Image: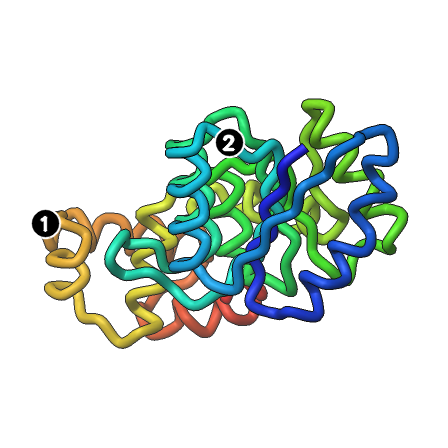
């Protein structure tokens, strides 16, 4: 059993390394490799791929120092890179509080085997979740289920482009800049913004951010 832990907090890695042997008591050899950032994780994945020693499980944090060279800016991007190199490796996100948009992005774009918010589970619950994932099951912790359910109620935000538009608006981008960033026409952006406003039941552009933040999406 080969396990990759990628987390930029050494104390969290150490805690997981202490707990994991209890989850795999029947395994004779549990080999754990740790990475503190995306760059080190990429190098580790490449090294194990070249050695034909794929990981069976990857426990990933979401927010970590990035690797711009490979366009890996967070744990979600790292997970996609890992899946390309090791398609049979199970992916388990164990991370702190995430914005609703980030949760739905992980769920819809990255599609990991598990998303767990650290504050949702005890040590024993975490170990049981890891066991289930290794067996081939999917797992979402309580607050993740709540967030994904809420986002599906607001169907407009299950579309990645709409989430990107709101993110760019929050960063001060204008219509023309958003269109250039997303490689869409300004008319297409304006149509999507109109649908977002309709979905949020608001009438002016300046209220989008206020309403999105009020609902806890950002």
**Secondary structure under badge 1?**
loop
**Disc 1 target residue:** 185
Please name the residue shown 45% across and 53% down the image: 41
Please name the residue shown 74% across and 54% down the image: 17
- State the residue in front, 88 or 107: 88
Circle 2 packing at 10 Å, graded few (<14), some (14-19), many (20+), is few
Q: Is residue 202 above or below residue 86?
A: below
Q: Kindly indicate whether the residue at mark 2 contacts the one at mark 1 (C-beta within 8 angstroms).
A: no
Q: Is residue 24 above or below residue 71?
A: above
Q: Is residue 89 above or below residue 60?
A: above
Q: Is residue 212 left or right of residue 162?
A: right
Image position, residue 63 (x, y; %): 50, 64
Please name the residue shown 18% across and 70% down the image: 174
Q: Is residue 170 left or right of residue 180?
A: right
**Secondary structure under badge 2?**
loop
Is residue 49 among what the camera can see? yes
Circle 1 packing at 10 Å, graded few (<14), some (14-19), many (20+), is some
- State the residue in front, 131 or 2: 2
**Disc 2 target residue:** 53
Please name the residue shown 57% across and 43% down the image: 153
Lower sequence index among marks 1 and 2? 2
Q: CA distance from mark 1 to mark 2?
A: 46 Å
Image position, residue 156 (x, y; %): 42, 45
Image position, residue 196 (x, y; %): 37, 53
Image position, residue 117 (x, y; %): 69, 56
To which quarter of the image does residue 98 belong? bottom right
To which quarter of the image does residue 3 belong? top right
């Amino acid at each position: 059993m080969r396990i990759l832990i990628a987390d930029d907090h050494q104390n969290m890695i150490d805690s997981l390394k202490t707990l994991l042997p209890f989850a795999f008591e029947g395994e004779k050899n549990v080999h754990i490799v740790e990475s503190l950032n995306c760059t080190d994780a990429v190098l580790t994945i490449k090294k194990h791929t070249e050695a034909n020693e794929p990981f069976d499980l990857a426990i990933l944090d979401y927010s970590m120092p990035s690797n711009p060279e490979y366009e890996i800016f967070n744990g979600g991007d790292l997970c996609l890179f890992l899946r390309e190199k090791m398609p049979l490796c199970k992916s388990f996100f164990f991370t702190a509080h995430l914005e609703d948009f980030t949760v739905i992005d992980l769920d819809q774009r990255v599609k990991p085997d598990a998303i767990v918010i650290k504050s949702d589970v005890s040590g024993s619950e975490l170990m049981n979740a890891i066991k289930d994932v290794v067996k081939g099951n999917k797992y979402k912790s309580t607050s993740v289920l709540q967030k994904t359910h809420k986002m599906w109620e607001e169907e407009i935000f299950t579309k990645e482009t709409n989430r990107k538009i709101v993110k760019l608006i929050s960063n001060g981008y204008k219509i023309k800049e958003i269109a250039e960033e997303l490689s869409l026409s300004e008319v297409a952006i304006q149509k999507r913004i109109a649908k977002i406003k309709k979905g949020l039941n608001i009438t002016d552009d300046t209220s989008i951010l206020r309403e999105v933040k009020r609902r806890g999406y950002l």
